Amino acid sequence: MLANDQLTALDATFLELEEADDSAVMHIGGALLFTELPGGGTPGIGQVREHLERRLDLLPRYRQKLCAPHTGGLSWPSWEADRRFELEAHVRHATLPSPGEDGDFLEWISDFYSHRLDRSRPLWEIVLLDGLADGRWALVHKTHHCLVDGVGSVDLVGLLLDAEPAPPDSSAPHSARVSASVDASHGWLSYLSAPVGLLTGAGVAAARAGAHAVMHPREGLERSRDMIDLLIRDELIAAPRSSLNVPIGATRRIATAHVELQELRTVRSALGGTVNDVVLCAATGALRELLLARGEDPPRQGLRAMVPVNVRSEGDHGDLGNQVSSLFVGLPVAEADPLRRYQLVVATTEKLKAGGQARAASALTGVTELAPPVLHAGLARMLFAKRLFNVTITNVPASPGLVYAFGATLVDVVPIVPLAAEHALGIAVVSYAGGMTFGLCADRGTVPDLDVLTAGIVTSLNELAALAHATSAAR
């Protein structure tokens, strides 16, 4: 048994969001693409299952299920051992239909992420997908967010990754080896859970901060002012109406855009700001193109993005998952000039980071933890309402160097953003080994034009690169 088997209010939030609306699918995950094995071919499903079986005891929660499939009542559900647990039911094999091109792959994972996990079983699944062009293969997985919060800094994918093609002992179920692999992969769990960072453990930090405020009243007063400011600007003053915030279905459409990380660093160096500012500006330009293509006037106040941020102090650097909050960033989609658009993004993020909005978001989340289970669902939905934000955008680094599985090189990562009700689009960005992948997750019915967004990201980055080159040449 684990030390604490009862779900926290934060864990239960992701169950409640699904229960409130059939369109909300609250699992997180990603698709990891590999080259063929050094000797050719792909690993067999038996090999993957055996590998995980030897190491799954490091993640005991993955053998547990919910004691009740729904929330509510006077207490949260607890985790209990699944006495009928079968690894074969969670680790499956599939072959992509020929010719296995990138479009076929994206269609397959779009369908995979459209289906909810079975709450009568442990809430995770991983698929070994072969049949991709050029001998490539993939590990595609999803885990319910209520499960991931309880795992810690090591996740399922980390058990399969190595820091080198041929680790010293690839068969031993040794925790030190697994930890080294996860460190080398730079914390896969942190990026997979980042898209819903507003509720990922932020309330725990807020609860601790509440006790701290009693001893430090001046800080408590500042926190209160920050939260009031947040409520006025980002709740009473609602996010603008948009075709991205309408009733949606549960079927997803996934697309990607690939760029070189150095291109974003060049823009940052020439124009100021951060790499994350470049990401936000690229998304802003793409969203502007999408709205214009739909015949919509981009709102003058801009779209509002929920952007998860790390609020961890230096002393807490080793902790993953309990110290994440969010900024609510206005994206100036009405601005036609790319340089002015970038300057506005930089100014906005600098102001928000200098203020206390991330701290206020943590405190606001902490307030919801005080509600009993029977009342908590309404508060949870409030924090993911379209009134609060239009779109989620998250940017998290993975490993700066190459990592491997079964000797094959990981060549790409497709990150997935879960979509709450009436949020038709989410953007996750992950940097890995010098490359950057924009993973776009959209409702299939309301965003048939996702290709406009992917093209817009590339166009926007090209505009910024041209500005950076001109600025550098003028110096």
Image: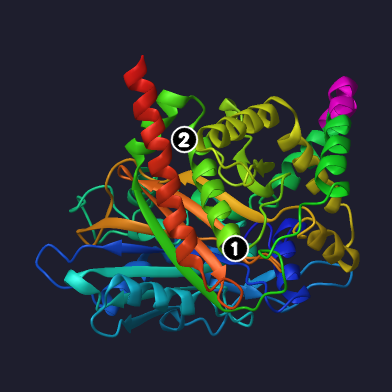
Other-residue count near label 2 (Cα within 10 Å), few / some / many at <14 / 14–19 / ≥20: some
In-front residue for pair 284/169: 284
Location of residue 39 in the rendering, given as x and y in whole percent from the top left corner: 9, 66
Q: Quadrant of the N terminus?
A: bottom right
In-front residue for pair 79/95: 95
Q: Against 433, is 133 above or below?
A: below
Residue at the image point whose x is 32% and y is 76% from the top? 129
Location of residue 364 in the rendering, given as x and y in whole percent from the top left corner: 82, 45
Circles 1 and 2, Cβ within 8 Å, touching? The answer is: no
Query: Does the magenta run of residues contain 277?
Result: no
Residue at the image point whose x is 50% and y is 31% from the top? 274
Q: Quadrant of the C terminus?
A: top left
The residue range painted magenta reads 212-222
Per the model, the C-alpha gap separating discs 1 and 2 is 22 Å
Residue to which mark 2 is pinned: 275
Residue at the image point whose x is 72% and y is 45% from the top? 300
Location of residue 158 in the rendering, given as x and y in whole percent from the top left corner: 40, 56
- Is residue 424 rendered to the left or right of residue 52? right
Residue 1 visible:
no
Query: Does the magenta run of residues contain 216?
Result: yes
Judged from the image, the secondary structure of the residue bearing numbered disc 2 is helix
Label 1 amino acid? Leu
Location of residue 55 in the rendering, given as x and y in whole percent from the top left corner: 39, 63
Label 2 amino acid? Val
Q: Earlier in the sequence, mark 1 or mark 2?
A: 2
Judged from the image, the secondary structure of the residue bearing numbered disc 1 is strand
Main SS of the magenta part reads: helix
Residue at the image point whose x is 69% and y is 25% from the top? 354
Residue 396 visible:
yes
Residue to which mark 1 is pinned: 425
Q: Quadrant of residue 174?
A: bottom left
